[in-house]
């Protein structure tokens, strides 16, 4: 994850079919949260728009609205069950990674018209 310009990475993006993800939305980096089997327990009603992208589809991005805050339960790096609240960019990234683990991409949250436009742009770039 540190080698790319992102704030999270899911194992599935690397071809590893395991429910593992890492997120670090800190300003200086070095605050990575490693999660196994993450599940969202609670999502805020208030949404937050954020421009999302993925190395799986380089060169394109889209503004996605997601809950501003989430509570997530996961196994941490020590193998202990942990529940943690994530807010802002942290919450966006955690939700984005959990989507990857469930076989979804950020553009799956777009309308069909917007998703098709984004995928056409990606094909032209690639």
Image (tube, rainbow, N blue to C red):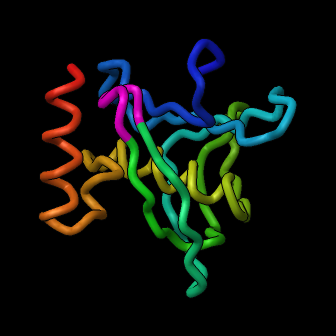
Furthest-right residue in this view: 28
**Quadrant of the frame with the C terminus:** top left
> Where residue 38 sits in the image (x, y, percent)?
51, 51
Give the side of residue 8 with respect to residue 25, left or right.
left
Q: How many marks?
A: 0
Q: Residue at x 66, y 51 (%)?
A: 81
Which of the image's four quarters has the N terminus?
top right
Which residue sits furthest top? 3
Q: Which residues are magenta?
A: 54-60
Who is closer to the viewer here, 12 or 28?
Answer: 28
User: From what the image shows, is residue 7 above or below residue 115?
Assistant: above
Where is residue 86, by image quadrant? bottom right
Is residue 110 placed above or below 61 in the rendered structure?
A: below
Q: Is residue 66 above or below residue 9?
A: below
Where does the image place residue 98, in percent across and percent down from the top left?
A: 44, 50
Residue 76 on the magenta span: no
Q: Residue at x 58, y 31 (%)?
A: 6
């Amino acid at each position: 994850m540190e080698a790319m310009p992102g704030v999270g990475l899911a194992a599935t993006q690397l071809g590893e079919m395991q429910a593992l993800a890492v997120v670090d939305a800190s300003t200086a980096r070095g605050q990575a949260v490693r999660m196994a089997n993450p599940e969202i327990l609670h999502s805020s009603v208030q949404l937050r728009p954020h421009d999302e992208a993925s190395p799986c589809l380089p060169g394109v991005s889209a503004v996605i609205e997601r809950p501003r805050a989430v509570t997530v339960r996961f196994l941490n790096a020590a193998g202990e069950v942990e529940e943690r609240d994530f807010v802002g960019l942290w919450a966006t990234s955690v939700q984005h990674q959990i989507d990857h683990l469930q076989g979804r991409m950020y553009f799956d949250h777009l309308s069909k018209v917007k998703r098709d436009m984004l995928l056409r742009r990606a094909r032209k770039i690639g």
